[in-house]
Image (cartoon, grey):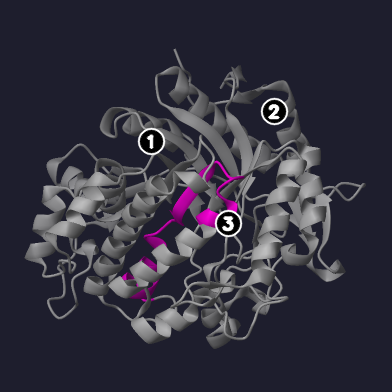
Amino acid sequence: MSTQTWKIPDGFILGAAASAWQTEGWDGKRPSQDSYLDMWYKNAAHIWHNGNGPAVATDFYNRYKEDIGYMKEIGLTHYRTSINWSRFLIDYETAEVDEVYAGYIDNVINELIASGVEPMICLEHYEIPAALMEKYGGWGSKHVVDLYTAYTEKVLQRYGDRVKYWFTFNEPIVPQTRIYLDAIRYPYEQNTKKWMQWNFNKALATAKAVQLFRAGKAWLREDAKIGVILNPEVTYARSSAQHDQKAAHIYDLFFNRVFLDPCIKGGYPEELMELLVRHEIVFDHDEDELDLIKQHTVDFAGINLYYPCRVKAPSRQWNDSTPFHPAYYYEHFELPGRKMNPFRGWEIYPRIVYDMAMRMKNEYGNIEWLIAENGMGVEDEKRFKNEDGIIQDDYRIEFISSHLAEAVKGITDGSNCKGYMLWAFTDNVSPMNAFKNRYGLVEIHLEQNRRRALKKSAHFYRQIIQNRQFETELDRLYK
């Protein structure tokens, strides 16, 4: 391996991200304002690591000034968070705003701007109101799509004068994949057709939000943009053999292009639609909805990148009594000798950033995009503290620098990548995992009233932001 110096392009965003539900806690929340995540936690708190969940989280609701002070100290150019739909409204049918929570969001945005940190706002990060799950079945309902659009309008009217970057969803495929495809999250129902309906309705909701955004320019900054944050898994076939290549291609259709194509290109791949017909899981839709999606694609995209997906052709016979699952066409494959994050069980392969950069350039019109999440979760980080009590997270520094180098290389080769957002700014709650694996630049001491402390990586990130360059050793050489 050789060490190279990588220069950060002018204007390149270097920020961090977290969501509302993973940071705010429940202080000030009305009993009727549970989100889906709150409902899940209340019904199954025992499966969240050590019982930690969104009830307290990092208490950002009360400590946002303190945390934004750390953002300023580190020098973040941007901070991406979400507005909790379930807390923003009192009445989800009439879109009556909760002025207390809305005022808190006002304060957060203003504090960020005053501290030189530009806010990026996501409209839904798994925060659909629990009441809409219980009454309408959540994102399976077209009425919920309309309620989301009404909520979006209220948010844009209130904050559009101060926020440049908007996102309709974060990882819109994830909740229904966990709930209805794999049945590992509350309420644990395996139903592939519901999975596809949620996928379509979220793409439709994105198009409706884009339509509203473009019609509401009077509310917005002149330079405002609206996008969506997706988590396509950069997919590699086990081999060049046709059967493995087919497995990777179909995996890509079901899990990546199902959102990439409608949100960026304005339509669904014909091959995907044929598969949906074949397996009787076509989503309910009409031509007007497809036309709306076609006419209202996003301005830019956020892409969350953590690990590669490796697949091979299935080697087992499918059980005919089992409901259809895309795994009918593939099996996961573990690359021998792969580098692993053993705590999260994920392969570390920085090349995914470059390969996604080339895909966005070559297949998606070289649309503006940014890495909206990238990070490394590690268990029991306290064992890496030095004599001064600072976590020496050199593994995170290596992870950031190797992935960021691939982004810079992608830009050099023509990709329109505009930034890098680390997940996460502070340690925070994750579904089921809770605080088990830590991702933050800033440590959260649960046992000391959630006291904050900068890790070594925070100082490293500050140096990158200040110097606009960094050095790293890569596992592969660029010629």
Mark 3 crowd level (few <14, some 14–19, many ≥20, 10 Å Cα):
some
Name the element at disc 2.
helix
Q: Amino acid at mark 1?
A: Met
- In the displayed image of the protein, which residue is found farthest to the right? 388
Q: Specify start and end residues of the magenta stretch as a single range.
A: 156-183
Do labels 1 and 3 touch, CB within 8 Å?
no
- Count the labels in the image: 3
Tell me residue 39's x, y (percent): 53, 82
Q: Amino acid at mark 2?
A: Ile
Counting residues from the start of the chain, the first of labels 2 and 1 encountered is 1
Above or below 69: residue 60: below
Q: Which residue is mark 1?
A: 356
Q: Amino acid at mark 3?
A: Arg
Quadrant where the N terminus sits is top right
Task: Identify which residue is drawn at 33% across, 52% down.
Answer: 333
Q: Which residue is mark 3?
A: 158
Name the element at disc 3.
helix
Counting residues from the start of the chain, the first of labels 3 and 2 encountered is 3
Assess whether residue 75 is covered by the magenta stretch.
no
- Which mark, by number, is residue 464? 2
